[in-house]
Image (tube, rainbow, N blue to C red):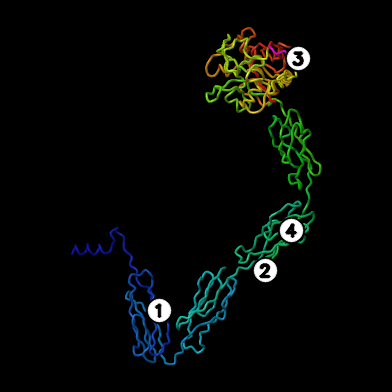
């Protein structure tokens, strides 16, 4: 007994220990409730067992009068005139459904069905009666069935009464009982527009301006939301079919939006008014540039919504700075110019542009860069741009030149020897200090005058230098060799004086003792950085002279080599720079810089000075 009881329990539960739910038949339906057949004809009945997921859907068929009609697996055969009921019964639960069969030799078969409407439009909750006519008119079985494709949109009862539910479309289908002929009616349930409003009842805009209008239709579920736009005065303001208003001329116009459904309207009163400029302000109000630089100016209008915000740009001195019609300023030469913006109605504002001359000066002294890929083993150069200061600082000492010499001598070594000659265009580097190629002995014009503003090398040898002789303006020589960008020359004495007139700001450095520059790390080529020097130019701090300030020139105290044998003197305490201006037949003007002052002096051409170049 006990084992049998265990088996019975096992059958009631799954292996997971949960009770299995048994699905049983709840209903069976036939596709036909009645049929009319002629003797000798057949028709098929279809049984639907519910629910769909029932395990056992098997059924049995039975005729109440097999003399009139028989049935096998739903296939009904008419035997003789009379009536019979065909019953289908489910195996599970014994649920039944019945179809009445009428057998007669006088049956007129249906050949089709038509509806009184093929398409109707309704509003929610409205009804419409559809009438089905089975053809031919004398058809024996005129029974029909009604069905909606979407009961959420529209329903239909078995008398053909359609009821609208919600906006959308549904198809109502009528099907004949005899032979399943169908006809359809498309039902559109329309949500009518009840109102329209516009987002802006009034607006003020300037001529040529645009304004986008928008509308809201009530209810938001309305079926037809199309509208048309119109203006009461196209000469004042126009409107396109997207509601975009364009102002044409001063005045007033009414913009109207109208719904296609119901003709509901909403209006916007548009005032077109020219707004005059009261004042303008150019920004920035002042600008400082270097020659070749550009600066962008902009204009602020008062009021900000002024109608005509066009301006004309002009310069008070186009030789100093020009401006294009977009407000882009281009600096040309040192000086000042007013850049003006003028409105159509005469309002103006200006920017004071100062073009500083410092950009014309090189940003470092001349140095030698060793480069084995070059034919001469390197090249003479100097810092031209602020970016160049990354490798050639503005406070490097540079290399020495006698006046009018192209032969550089190293900064290293207090006593001169020919090993300190870094490079020689002549190919010969075995010179005593006295016979290094230079223009020290030239006495013919223009090398015999006393004109501080004269560039004596301008006409020398046609180029300003003689490479084969190793003589001339070293700055012009460096430019011609392509070792720097642009055209450069030695400054005149006047140009050094003009630089000093810009204003000496500060002396940098506090150690006045002579400095023996250590060798190595390119120091012999002029890269030694001095902590002492002068700044020229307004607004420049003297705390760091490694990069030339935007508004000034940094001059380090790089010492000099004496006329007697080329010995180095006073590194870190004094420094001398050659000009291109001679002083009688044996001297030339030079700039001397010390802790005491900076001044123009005349020096023997036999000295060795460092060089600071200036643009042609």
- Which residues fall within the magenta stretch? 441-446
Q: Which residue is mark 3?
A: 449
Q: Secondary structure at mark 2?
A: loop
Q: Quadrant of the C terminus?
A: top right
Pointer 1 local density, CA inside 10 Å: few below 14, some 14–19, many at least 20: some
Residue that lies at the very extreme toward the top in this rendered image: 564
Q: Which residue is mark 4?
A: 238
Q: Position of residue 573 (x, y in %)?
A: 63, 11
Measure the alpha-carbon separation of dots 2 and 3.
103 Å
Residue at (71, 38) in percent of width and height: 328
Q: Position of residue 35 (x, y in %)?
A: 42, 85
Q: Which residue is mark 1?
A: 30
Q: Which residue is mark 2?
A: 262
Looking at marks 2 and 1 on the same chain, the residue that comes earlier in the sequence is marked by: 1
Relative to 596, is 98 above or below? Answer: below
- Badge 2 vs badge 4, beta-carbon distance below 8 Å: no
Looking at marks 3 and 4 on the same chain, the residue that comes earlier in the sequence is marked by: 4
Residue 29 occupies quadrant: bottom left
Please state if 376 lies on the left or on the right of 231 as rendered.
left
Relative to 606, is 280 above or below? Answer: below
Looking at marks 1 and 3 on the same chain, the residue that comes earlier in the sequence is marked by: 1
Q: Secondary structure at mark 3?
A: loop
Residue 94 among magenta residues: no
Residue 67 occupies quadrant: bottom left
């Amino acid at each position: 007994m006990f084992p049998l009881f265990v088996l019975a329990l096992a059958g009631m539960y799954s292996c997971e220990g949960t009770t299995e739910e048994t699905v049983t038949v709840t209903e069976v339906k036939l596709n036909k409730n009645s049929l009319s057949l002629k003797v000798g004809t057949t028709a098929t009945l279809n049984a639907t067992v519910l629910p769909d997921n029932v395990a056992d859907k098997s059924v049995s068929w039975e005729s109440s009068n097999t003399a009139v009609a028989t049935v096998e697996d739903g296939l009904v055969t008419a035997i003789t005139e009379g009536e019979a009921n065909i019953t289908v019964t489910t195996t599970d639960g014994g649920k039944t459904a019945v179809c009445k069969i009428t057998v007669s030799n006088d049956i007129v078969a249906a050949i089709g069905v038509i509806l009184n409407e093929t398409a109707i439009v309704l509003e929610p909750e409205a009804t419409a009666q559809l009438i089905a006519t089975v053809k031919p008119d004398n058809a024996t079985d005129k029974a029909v069935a009604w069905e909606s494709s979407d009961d959420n949109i529209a329903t239909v009862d078995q008398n053909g009464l359609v009821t609208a539910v919600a906006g959308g479309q549904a198809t109502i289908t009528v099907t004949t009982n005899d032979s399943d002929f169908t006809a359809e009616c498309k039902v559109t349930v329309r949500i009518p527009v009840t109102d329209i409003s516009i987002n802006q009842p009034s607006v003020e805009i300037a001529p040529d301006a645009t304004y986008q209008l928008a509308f809201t239709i009530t209810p938001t579920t309305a079926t037809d939301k199309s509208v048309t736009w119109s203006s009461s005065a196209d000469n004042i303001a126009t409107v396109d079919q997207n509601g975009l208003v364009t102002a044409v001329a001063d005045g007033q116009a009414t913009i109207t939006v109208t719904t296609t459904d119901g003709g509901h309207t909403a209006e916007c009163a548009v005032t077109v008014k020219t707004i005059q400029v009261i004042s303008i302000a150019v920004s920035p109000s002042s600008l400082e540039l270097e020659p070749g630089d550009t600066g962008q100016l902009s204009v602020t209008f008062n009021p900000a919504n002024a109608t005509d915000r066009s301006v004309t740009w002009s310069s008070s001195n186009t030789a100093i700075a020009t401006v294009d019609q977009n407000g882009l300023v281009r600096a040309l030469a040192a000086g000042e110019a007013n850049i003006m913006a003028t409105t159509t109605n005469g309002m103006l504002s200006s920017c004071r542009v100062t073009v500083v001359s410092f950009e014309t000066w090189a940003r470092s002294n001349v140095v030698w860069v060793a480069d084995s890929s070059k034919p001469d083993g390197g090249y003479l150069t100097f810092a031209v741009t602020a970016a160049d200061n990354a490798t050639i600082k503005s406070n490097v000492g540079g290399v020495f030149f006698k006046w009018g010499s192209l032969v550089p001598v190293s900064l290293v070594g207090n006593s001169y020897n020919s090993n300190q000659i870094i490079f020689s265009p002549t190919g010969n580097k075995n010179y005593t200090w006295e016979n290094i190629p230079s223009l020290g002995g030239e006495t013919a014009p223009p090398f015999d005058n006393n004109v501080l503003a004269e560039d004596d090398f301008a006409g020398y040898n046609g180029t300003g230098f003689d490479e084969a002789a190793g003589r001339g303006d070293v700055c012009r020589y460096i430019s011609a060799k392509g070792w720097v960008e642009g055209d450069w020359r030695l400054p005149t004495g006047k140009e050094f004086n003009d630089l000093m007139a810009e204003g000496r700001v500060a002396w940098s450095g506090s150690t006045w003792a002579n400095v023996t520059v250590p060798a190595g790390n390119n120091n012999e080529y002029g890269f030694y950085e001095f902590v002492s020097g002068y700044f020229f130019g307004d607004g420049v701090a003297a705390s760091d002279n490694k990069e030339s300030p935007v508004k000034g020139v940094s001059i380090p105290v790089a010492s000099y080599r004496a006329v007697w044998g080329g010995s180095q003197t006073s590194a870190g305490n004094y420094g001398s720079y050659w000009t291109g201006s001679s002083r009688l037949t044996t001297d030339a003007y030079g700039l001397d810089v010390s802790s005491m002052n900076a001044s123009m002096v005349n020096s023997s051409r036999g000295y060795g000075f460092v060089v600071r170049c200036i643009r042609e």
